[in-house]
Image (cartoon, rainbow, N blue to C red):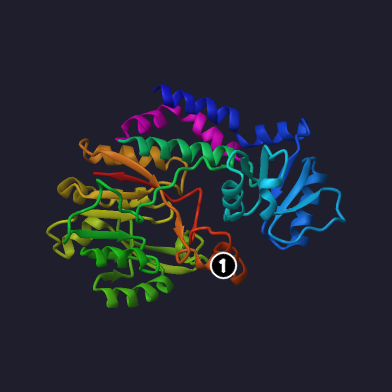
Amino acid sequence: MKNFVKLIEQVHAQRYMKVLNAVVAKKIPVAFMSIDLLDKAVDTVKNFRAQGLNVTQLITTFEPRNEVDFDVVNLRDAEKIYPQPEYIFTNDPYEIDARIALKNFPDAKIIIMRDDTDAVYETFMSHLDELREVYESLIDDMSRKTFRGYWLGNISNRFGEIVYTNAEHYLIDGFIPAEGAVVIDGGLGDGGTAKIFAQTGYQVYGFEPSRQNFEVARKVAAENNFVAENLGLGAYKHETTFTQEPNPGASKIDPHGTETVKITTLDAYVREKNLRRVDFIKLDVEGAELDVLRGAVTTIARFKPILALSAYHKWDDFWTLMNFVKSIRSDYEFAMRQFVMSREDGAYLFDANTEKNLDLLGLRPAITNSGECVLFAR
């Protein structure tokens, strides 16, 4: 309870707009970090300065120029900067600049400039009872650190607050099924996660409503001996519409979508295929996780499978998913982990120049992301 109260205090003190407004009002000197093309980075700094942010340094990977009224510093000279910046701002949505800044300036406050986070703050502060119950239900310190980092990081935009695990996606100690387990992969995507499950020795049944994604996953399934179904999972059997996004992993059920897809329930599928057991259920279905659980009540109650549920598509996922699982079986235990995206998973994000910079700067081939938080139950 003491640590949860401390988190509330930190959330209130570090909320993004509160800190940003204070930095602007006090004209605190700040640095801006960017590996973008120098002309573009210079223009960005000029724009921030015009808005009142006292940017006195641009830290870049390019050779500095002197025709601007702020310092332009090459990253290789980071240690020579004196005094070291207290605040470093970035505006890279994929957080690469922030990772570089944190690596080279570990004592600085690294803040990502993006949308106002007041809505996240209000959600957190108006649901403290539910969030405290979730926090107190988590079984280990890493889960509680993950919980803290997720909320504080998303409310403060302060890079470095979010705590990432080094574990394989969806497979963490204490929540790994035995060899030969029957695994349900809800949200098959391109089949990459199901491939890992199959190579681990599991019998995998994957579900992907998008025809485009399914055609890719079907080939992976054939090569790796798992079942791929061109179906979505939900609370009841029906047909609905679907939107295919440029990022295949973000495609989702959408009442305004142009693609028609079939939805079944996990309970119906288990019954129709006469599955004698289900040991593990992974769900990453772009906000439809609760609907899928509603269609899996009998399966969960009967087999008590390990659950790995994406809990970042909606702000209330943290408590609605946990509470629903508890309503099915009160003997579940819960953990939480934050994952990175692999470079392969996020390949659509990168151009050749970004790939080159990632390698030159010694950053591991992964994308940190304020989402990718998974609730586990066993």
Membership of 274 in magenta stretch = no
**Numbered range of the magenta stretch:** 117-139
Q: Quadrant of the N terminus?
A: top left
Locate residue 233: give its quadrant. Answer: bottom left
Q: In the rendered view, does 61 fall on the left or right side of 228?
A: right
Locate residue 239: give its quadrant. Answer: bottom left
Query: Which residue appears at 29% of the width and 77% of the height?
Result: 223
Q: In the rendered view, does 358 fall on the left or right side of 56?
A: left
Q: Badge 1 local density, few (<14 within 10 Å), some, or many (20+)? A: some
Q: Quadrant of the C terminus?
A: top left
Q: How many marks?
A: 1
Q: Specify the farthest residue to the top.
A: 2
Q: Position of residue 158 (x, y in %)?
A: 58, 41
- Up the image or down, 277 lies above or below 107; here it is below
Query: Which residue appears at 13% of the width and 63% of the height?
Result: 274
Membership of 126 in magenta stretch = yes
Q: Which residue, given by chain and number where applicable, does mark 1 sit on?
A: 355
Query: Which residue appears at 58% of the width and 37% of the height?
Result: 156
Secondary structure beneath disc 1?
helix
